[in-house]
Each structure stands twice: as C-alpha cells, then as structure tokens.
Amino acid sequence: MVPGQYAAAWPSFVVADDPSSLTFTIAADEPHTLTGTTSDAAAEPIRRRYATGLQLHRLHQAEFRQRVVRAYHQACAICRLRHDELLDAAHILPDGHPLGEPTVPNGLALCKLHHAAFDRNIVGIRSDLVVEASLDVLHEIDGPMLIHGLQGWHGAPLQVPRPVEDRPNPDFLAERYEVFRRAG
C-alpha cells in the first residue's frame, strides 16, 4: 500500500441483517485491489486473476440490436460499414433515460468506432440528420484513422431507414445533440 491510496475489496455482499439493531453483515469475495504504479507493473509479471460478481443484463438488448441493424440494412448509419460483427445498436437516449426505450426510433446502427464516439460525445448527430465531430477532434492532427474515421464524416448526412416509422426520433436526436454540444 502507498500512503494516501485506498484498497477496495470487491465484490462484497450483504449476507445477513438485523433490523432491530440496525446492523448487517458483509462478506467479501477474494480481495481485489487497485493499488500499484506503472513502475510496480514493470517489476512484477501480470498474473491471471478472476472475480465473481453480479451483473445486470439488459435482456432486451439482443432483440433491440437485431431490429435496429435490420432497419439500417446491416450498415453503419455514418460510414456504411457492412460487417455485421462490427455493428452495434446504439441508443440515442440511453437505456437509463425515462424515454430511452429499446425501439428502432431510439436506435442507430453504428459500427464499433462510431458507437463509441457517439456514446463519448466525440461525434454528435443533429436532428436534421447531419453528423458532426467535436471541435477538439476536428482540430486534432493524427493519422489516417482520425482523418477518415472521424473528421471525414463531419457534415455528412446520416443514412437512415426508408420507412418513416423506423427513422430516428428527431426529438430524441435534438436532446442527445444538446448533450454532445455541452460536452464539447
């Protein structure tokens, strides 16, 4: 341990409680820590370690993905990449948002790169279906992936499904675009 650093023990589980005394018992699984520095990492080899835990799974996600990707004809709405294994169904309004339902109008078929960029506000999509890259990305100088993968799509039209009922909800896009603008 390094002074000023804390070691977290997880996962931890409540295994018993006593409401009358307002107490409970916690059991920790194998201890896991976040300590160490890069110099420590070079000195010791990385060992395989595993943790047991509980995870919330979105059971609707597989069906949401299938419907969204099919509506977009198995292509990224930004770059038109057609490798199904590299496509995701991105939520316009996140799953945790009150209006973030798993419906095609709240979804976009995006490749892995553009999904990550959309979720992290590196690219935004206006309600008039135009793609924008964040200002810092537009001013960044780097290799061909940045130029062709992100900067090159700034100002490009989003490719959307033909049926109006499958197109992105413009109100959802407007709300999500404001999040993008505030982040930039």
Image (cartoon, rainbow, N blue to C red):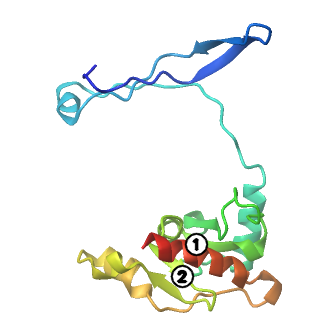
Q: Which residue is mark 1?
A: 110
What is the three-letter code of the residue carrying label 1? Leu
Q: Is residue 155 left or right of residue 137?
A: right
Residue 54 image point, x, y percent: 65, 31
Q: Quadrant of residue 35?
A: top left
Tell me which residue sits at (22%, 24%) in the image.
Answer: 44
Which quadrant, please, contains the C terminus?
bottom left
Determine whether the residue tagged by mark 2 lies in a helix, strand or loop. Answer: loop
Residue 2 image point, x, y percent: 25, 22
Residue 4 image point, x, y percent: 28, 26
Front residue of 20 and 10: 20
Residue that extends furthest to the right in the rendered view of this protein: 165
Tell me which residue sits at (78%, 55%) in the image.
Answer: 60
Tell me which residue sits at (56%, 77%) in the image.
Answer: 178
Which quadrant, please, contains the N terminus?
top left
Q: Which residue is mark 2?
A: 78
Q: Is residue 121 left or right of residue 7?
A: right
Looking at marks 1 and 2 on the same chain, the residue that comes earlier in the sequence is marked by: 2
Front residue of 84 and 42: 42
Are discs 1 and 2 less than 8 Å apart at CB? yes
